[in-house]
Amino acid sequence: MKQGRKKFLKQLGAGLLAAGLPTIAHVANAAETHIDVNDFTDDGLPDNERFWKRIARKYYNVADDHINLENGYYGIQPKPVLHAFQKNIVTANEQAARFARKDYPGIASVVKKELAAFLEVSEEEIIITRNATEALNIAIQGYPFKPGDEVLLNQLDYFSMVETFKMLENRGLLKVNTFDMPLLPLSNDEIIEQYRKLITAKTKVILLTHVSNINGLIIPVTEIAAMAKAKGIDTITDSAHALGQIPFSLPQLGSDFVGFNLHKWIGNPVGAGVLYIKKERIKEMKPLYGDVAAAENSINKLAHFGTTPFAVVMTIPDSLAFHRMMGIEKISKRLDYLKTTWLNAVKDHPNVEVVTPVNLSAAIASFRIKNKTAAEVADHLFKEHKIFTVARQLGKQGCVRVTPGIYNSAADVQKLADAIKLLADQ
Ligand SMILES: Cc1ncc(COP(=O)(O)O)c(C=O)c1O
């Protein structure tokens, strides 16, 4: 994931083009997308509005009737990726069953190799799913829990994963223990301590939501996974919001089960996720979807889920290539800058409560306004200012989540800050 842009550019086209797959290198030659690698060699400093404006204008088609600050749902595909996706849709549609039966298996296998290289793991350790929910359900429901096992969750975990664990609890398969994570921890040590002090002799699994969808808190997965492992406890890591938003190395996380999606921060078309399971752990996993044909130690036994969105999967190399061309360091610093800009502008207002620790988060940050529900605030921002955000559940009042994307400008988030202060003054 941290592979240098230069090294990557050298590699462009080598493997995938040979396999007949669309790549950025291929697209780069297509006049209709006007991609120019030189656009990405600029310094791209987080506050260089000229650089980011050029990237936004040239590479993203964004609706101009509102400001989208809800990029946490899914990301907008850059134009070259959208272009590749459209071509892939046409191919899969025109060629239909012949394509799906004869060509697609080879293409999917090359895509998987490319994705594994991007994630710095073996292709035998990943499956491509339709989203992070599916990936994590396969991990959670397939985990070999034994009677009496306990799992540890908190209120900032994603509700679908919490519900999956609760469903297993209702079936008598495990016991769920939950705690309230402080919304504004001062350090990683404080976060680690929350987990450490609640581990019991029966704790079997800790769910780690790498980047919270509610307030953007970044969990120090590597440290918690190491602490858990030392006590014989597994971690299942929900990295739905981490991949592409913050830099990290999957092998270095030290978590044996990790779920991702590619349609939030990687810019792939909606409908692609990834499940990683460390090789030596695959054997003990039980398939969620019936499969008796694949070998017990093959991850393919977990991937028997039927007809795939072909074009979505085929576009993965293009979205990875564009993402790499931008560079995760550059992306995450820009996102952090946009977040910090609006947070700093509102944080001292007496009627505004920020519920995100500014130094332990990336793009996502959330807030509340005194005496107003989160839904009221989000509705107001859209109706009065054409700024789209989203209300999230958090305690009684909820919170409003704000998620800039890399095509947003500093002016966009400044408009948000002005609108928040106006409303908070009322
Ligand atoms: C933390 C977290 N985990 C999992 C998911 C589920 O992702 P998907 O919709 O790709 O299944 C989300 C989606 O918002 C999320 O925020």
Image: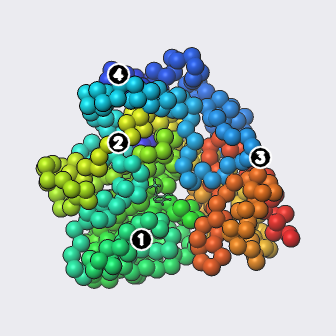
Q: Is 354 situated above or below 150?
A: above
Point out which mark residue 20 bears. 4
The span from disc 1 to disc 3 (Cα, nearest Å) is 39 Å
Amino acid carrying label 1: it is: Glu
Q: CA distance from mark 2 to mark 3?
A: 40 Å
**What residue is shown with label 3?**
411
- Tell me whether circle 2 and circle 3 mark residues in contact (CB < 8 Å): no
Chain-order first, disc 2 or disc 3: 2
Judging depth in this view, the residue of 410 and 100 nearest the camera is 100
Q: Residue 308's mark?
A: 2
Q: Amino acid at mark 4?
A: Gly
User: Is ligand 1 less than 8 Å from the beta carbon at label 4?
Assistant: no
Earlier residue among tags 1 and 2: 1
In the image, taking residue 116 as reference, residue 334 lies left or right, namely right
Q: Which of marks 3 and 4 precedes in the sequence? A: 4
Q: Which dot, 4 or 3, sits closer to the camera? A: 4
Q: Secondary structure at mark 3?
A: helix
Q: Residue at x 41, y 51 (%)?
A: 131
Q: Which mark is residue 163?
A: 1
Task: Give the Cα separation between the discs numbered 4 and 3.
Answer: 42 Å
